[in-house]
Amino acid sequence: MRASRPEQAPPAAPPLRIGVVGLGMAGALMVSVIRDHARAVLAGAAEPHESLRQRFAADNEAPVFADIESLLRRDDVDAVYIATPHQFHRDHVVLAAEHGKHIVVEKPMALSLADCDAMIAAAERHKVTLIVGHTHSFDPSVRVMRELIASGEYGKLMMLSGANYTDFLYRPRRPEELDTAKGGGILFNQVPHQIDTVRYLTRSRLRSLRAATGILDPRRPTEGNCSVFLDFEDGCFASLTYSGYDRFDTDEWHGWVGEGGYPRKAAHGATTRSWENFKNPEEELAARVERFGYGGSAAPASRIPVHQPHFGVLIASCEKADLRQSPDGVLVYSRDGVKEIPVPMRPGRPGRSDVLDELCDAVQCGVAPAHDGAFARGTVEASLAILKSAQERREVIL
Amino acid sequence: MRASRPEQAPPAAPPLRIGVVGLGMAGALMVSVIRDHARAVLAGAAEPHESLRQRFAADNEAPVFADIESLLRRDDVDAVYIATPHQFHRDHVVLAAEHGKHIVVEKPMALSLADCDAMIAAAERHKVTLIVGHTHSFDPSVRVMRELIASGEYGKLMMLSGANYTDFLYRPRRPEELDTAKGGGILFNQVPHQIDTVRYLTRSRLRSLRAATGILDPRRPTEGNCSVFLDFEDGCFASLTYSGYDRFDTDEWHGWVGEGGYPRKAAHGATTRSWENFKNPEEELAARVERFGYGGSAAPASRIPVHQPHFGVLIASCEKADLRQSPDGVLVYSRDGVKEIPVPMRPGRPGRSDVLDELCDAVQCGVAPAHDGAFARGTVEASLAILKSAQERREVIL
């Protein structure tokens, strides 16, 4: 495979026919991304909830199945986007590889390194592309930051500092999303965005980390806040803070543009109060499926963002400049002052469509993906090391 | 001594007669603070630079000397504020204690734990009060945060996250201020503000830390940026980031109110460009003394702040709320939304006058100071541990 994106436009390959496995929030979003993508077509879906299948069938001509294997058996499906609950990622990826399908699997790749290894081996054995995403490391402004760093104009990248304070813990949840052993909580669902991004920017191997975590609300018994210090082999270091308790909100420091690129207003505590109105876990689960799943009232599929997506604030300090994502580009702070390098909004959904770009580039043009299984395994390794460091109150060497 | 400030106003003790040792930037500021303080009077000064002595003599009736001992021999001096270069702190504190003077010494207390021990022992032997300050842990909004945490209303303090990006490295400097071994750089001059503040808020012993530091500009060959993870005995943890390279500026996240409480404008790189205009180190040294010393054009002594002082951004996450300094108080974010607890501007200079409050409370009312020698020694220990952790790339247990 080639090491980087070809400079010319890709050859006129037939569009990649992609099926979506799981029509929850991530899958629902990807349906519209596939439909909008110039180099892909929507080839089908698989989803166990009948109500979501009906909504999908009403909107799309592509077939929809209750089980993954019916989708995987189709000859008119080249690749699948797997957005099933975390505990199924390994089996579904291995199954897809065995059916010769190229794969994008949602983060976290898996919950153990053994599972990651099995997924990587299956993809290699069956010669299919395996990409893990979306994470916010796919955001166009992150990629531009990476290219600015790689240009050498600002010297070596030395320090990264990131923080994200959100309402994550109080969004409607399935029970397993509150169980760390089943991949619940921020360490497998939120912090990987930050870890992926700093690893993508540094391009260096993570040498060690020291972390601590918190479970601040016993009603949501999984990690909801953490602080991580990361030391990279090349001498770069990073500090990441996350809190999902719906209190302070870092979007204030990002011009009140939300994670997805939409303008929003301050709403401290509103998600908590809304969650407290659920009468029981069943009502919460129904809301999770109905509201956040395909076609639901809270599903962001139909809105096209007007700003770039982001995941909190992140300052990248190079020898000669600090770089920072802004709502519409990358800010460069140096002895010459501050300038903004605009990142144009292209058609489609920034970040998510970049996942498909990476898939199409790999399958259609032979470009090695940056977010392959080996890269994603490193982020799972980091998430597990955060848990270990917090439990043992010591630095973990990777 | 008593454990906390008396609830009643202090008895009508005669004002504390305070001499200032060193009329550089910190000393110059303290002269006006003493003059404005209801329970103190300015009793004299000592300063080796003749031009600064002349300016002081023109403004004040109190005597001014070229050497510290002439000031210490005065019977009409009860206490001294020592703001001499760091390398003199130990000798000057011991000398002041031997003369029976109460002492406030600027941070860093000293550059070694042996020196700290000698200073603490001298104060105990001669039964004088020893306070180390000013640091931004004296800021009124920090004290209000501490009291809010101690009230228990928001549950236990669990996580702290702080960041400060400034122009520190490019302000005019004496040569030793760029030599880490002589106490130069951010680890002894800037990060202690952050360490003091998180230690003051947690009230817990620091158990370990993991840190990395950077020297990004060879023209300023001392640590200019760092990232520190701190683990406290009671389970609270903190993440601190600092960069003094005049690029990104965290005052943007604090409503463009500067460290001292003044409204300001964005000026990324301006301090660097101004410094690059110095023809040689002698010109820089002269600017350091003349402009930043007593009565200089850049000395902030004559301006009274209109907002509370601060030192970057700091989020304190308790079990039930996040607390954050605002320009005029403390923001409390919880499930009930956000509210601001105002911190009224009292006459005088917030933060600096609180140092004198602590001194007067100790000397006049017998209240044990929070910022005593033992407390400050802990922050010196942390600064030294940051250096060690960065050099050895490993966690340091304290």
Image (spheres, coloured by chain):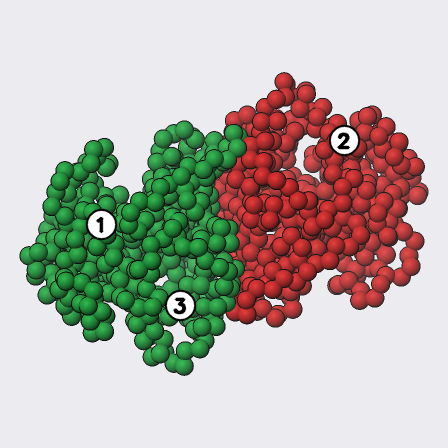
Chain colours: A green, B red
Disc 3: which residue = A171
Q: Chain of mark 1?
A: A
Residue A183 at what x, y percent from top left?
A: 32, 64
Disc 2: which residue = B296
Secondary structure beneath label 3: loop
Secondary structure beneath label 1: loop
- Mark linked to residue A37: 1
Which one is nearer the viewer's eye here, B262 or A225? B262
Residue B215 at what x, y percent from top left?
A: 51, 33
Q: Is residue B253 visible?
A: yes
Asked if B208 appears above or below B386 in the picture, the reply is below
Residue B379 at what x, y percent from top left?
A: 63, 48
* Residue A286 in the figure: left or right of residue B172: left
Query: What is the spatial separation of the Cα atoms under label 1 and label 3, in whole angstroms?
Result: 29 Å
Mark 3 and mark 2 on one chain: no
At a point 82% along the width and 26% down the height, the residue shown is B51
* Residue A329 in the figure: left or right of residue B164: left
At a point 45% along the width and 76% down the height, the residue shown is A276
